[in-house]
Amino acid sequence: MKVTIFGSGYVGLVTGACLAEVGNDVVCIDIDAGKIERLERGEVPIYEPGLDTIIKRNMVAGRLQFTTDIDLGVSHGLFQFIAVGTPPDEDGSADLQYVLAVARSIGERMQEYRVVVNKSTVPVGTADKVRGAVSEVLARRGVAIEFDVVSNPEFLKEGAAIEDFMKPDRIVVGTDNPRTTELLRALYAPFNRSHDRMVCMDIRSAELTKYAANAMLATKISFMNELANLAERLGADIEKVRVGIGSDPRIGYHFIYPGCGYGGSCFPKDVKALERTARDAGYPAQLLQAVEAVNDRQKEKLFEKISAYFGGDLAGKTIAVWGLAFKPNTDDMREAPSRTLMEALWRAGAKVRAFDPVAQEEAHRIYGDRADLILCDSPESALRGADALAVVTEWNVFRSPDFDEIKQSLTRPAVFDGRNIYDPAQMKAKGFDYFAIGRGSV
Ligand code: UDX
């Protein structure tokens, strides 16, 4: 089948590559000519395990091409995927200008029936706006060409996006007629083999499903972080509590890990956007507001602990930071807790020696050259001359370090563990001042 994808960012690239991988003929469009040139040379602009191999393989096979040519894109695909960004406005609502610009581009050029598939995370009601934008342009052109609009939200996890696309838990498809449902069923058939994972519904419900999923997951995390903070005050260990509650299948073990807060491109943005949608609908969503507030506070936790340890005086201190990405297996630092920590340390007059297995370049892109950020080429080098260590991202490489070396390198044996990856009893036995999240008095 012929597929066009507008937006060669994270979602667009993964979608395009995976649809090509199963034999479709895919054209990926972006307005950023530099990005398209790099992609044409086989350079993948994002770090996602397995993605560059799939992209290269399908480019060579002639099933995947990259272009800025919108005419080609609209004439190519029966399916016109919209996978462009929906950044938050100042008020938290999703900015739809890029989505609607693509819709108008399609309307301006289409000559025959097209299925416009919305993959971008968009507020409920956006499909109607997309339909309106296409119809308006068609009316201006004075032509009557049929088209359908579908909501097909993605549930990709960064670092596992290929796997999530190839073996999805569910394929949510929101349509307003059976014809489009069948077209989408055919397109997704290769990913829907062992049992039927298609969940078909009306368009508004599909749009809300995406937000509901992310808001639920964010709620689980903020709930655990709230209890972790309480556990600290009560002398209880949240890690014991986590296992104690997770064993109830109604609660489950997934996504109840306390830590120094959630980050990334989805949870913070989507919780805010849903909150905004709720407010606009005349329903102030108190739970969502609390989820966000708890997370904002949680991202301050490591700094508070470090600052308290040094008696509130961090001027001239150096803190080693292990992990910059918002989670392992990505170089994404959007809304990362590491940023909250480093920025607070800088404000307090401290220096940071940081190491991340893949996000160093991203950190340099964000912060540039500055004297108080030293990007180091190994975890060990980040420790050298530092006064304390903060672990912010649970990369595997940090899980079993040489503790003797850590102790020798630091001026104070202080470890602040934002992901609870070390054992408090062992750390104590090794002579560390060890601070974790929600683990009794530590
Ligand atoms: C998320 C959703 O999982 C995905 O389905 C959706 O499509 C996009 O948003 P992603 O942002 O890639 O994916 O990351 P995810 O693995 O879900 O982690 C999000 C954040 O939550 C990370 O900062 C992580 O450290 C944090 N987290 C996760 C916790 O603090 N505790 C947990 O138990 C789980």
Image (spheres, rainbow, N blue to C red):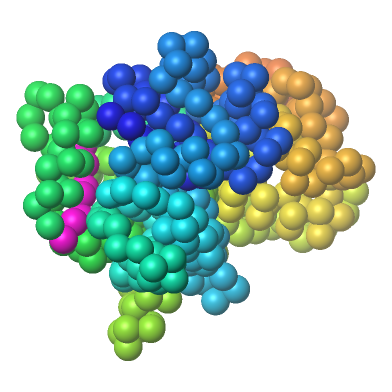
Q: Position of residue 188 (x, y in %)?
A: 21, 33
In-image side of 265 versus 413 (left or right): left
Magenta region: 169-176
Which residue is farthest bottom? 282
Where 203 sits versus 43, above or below?
below
Residues 260 and 189: in front is 189
In-image side of 238 versus 339 (left or right): left
* Count of numbered circles on the image: 0
Q: Residue at x 84, y 43 (%)?
A: 368
Q: Residue at x 57, y 40 (%)?
A: 69
Where 258 sits versus 23, above or below?
below
Residues 303 and 287: in front is 287
Which residue is farthest front? 142
Residues 166 and 436: in front is 166
Where 392 sits versus 261, above or below?
above
Q: Position of residue 378 (x, y in %)?
A: 72, 20
Q: Position of residue 219 (x, y in %)?
A: 34, 60
Q: Is residue 427 magenta?
A: no
The quadrant holding residue 370 is: top right
